[in-house]
Image (cartoon, grey):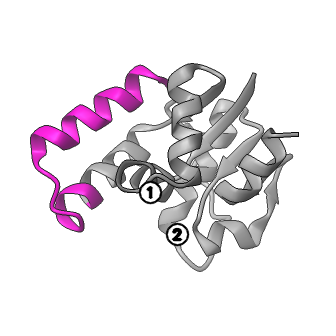
Amino acid sequence: MIKVVLDTNVFISALFWKGVPHQIFKEVLQGTVLNFTSPQILQELREKLLEKFDVSLEKVKEFLEIIVFNSQVVYPKNELNIVKKDHTDNKIIECAVEANASLVVSGDKHLLEIKEYKGIKIVSPKQFYENSAD
């Protein structure tokens, strides 16, 4: 089973739109893709949903519970400084390293520019979906 870390933007897209991120999240829910997350990713997602998207606290808690229930939560031990243009994105790579994941799935240009870190490929949702269909 493929081990991935979904970026916050993938979760948000999965929640609000029915595109490729939604399909990927459905695969996580079905258990065909193993997602890893961290408290830092969950906190960022919580903040964005509450502040930027004005989702009710009750709905945010519900969505986070679904993610936690269908993912493995890891606690990264090492802080990395790989993403120079946006240091907040390092939490995604930290999670992937801790989880020994194969892929990071993100729509974030700063992460996508890196392409790979220590054997962990960084791909867009579209790239992930096209490659998983093979």
Which amino acid, by three-letter code, is at mark 2?
Answer: His
Residue 101 coordinates in the image, percent (x, y) = 72, 35
User: Counting other residues with Cα less than 10 Å from the Cα at mark 1, is it few (<14), some (14-19), or many (20 or more)?
Assistant: some
Image quadrant occupied by the N terminus = top right
Residue 23 coordinates in the image, percent (x, y) = 56, 42
C-alpha distance separating marks 1 and 2: 22 Å
User: Counting other residues with Cα less than 10 Å from the Cα at mark 2, is it few (<14), some (14-19), or many (20 or more)?
Assistant: few
Label disc, if present, on residue 87 of the rendered structure: 2
Above or below: residue 58 compared with residue 116? above
Above or below: residue 78 compared with residue 108? above
Quarter residue 98 falls in: top right
Q: Is residue 59 on the magenta stretch? A: yes
Which of 33 and 93 lies nearest the eye of the viewer?
33
Q: Residue drawn 40% across and 31% down? A: 67
Which of 59 and 121 lies nearest the eye of the viewer?
59
Which of 131 and 2 lies nearest the eye of the viewer?
131
Residue 85 coordinates in the image, percent (x, y) = 59, 80
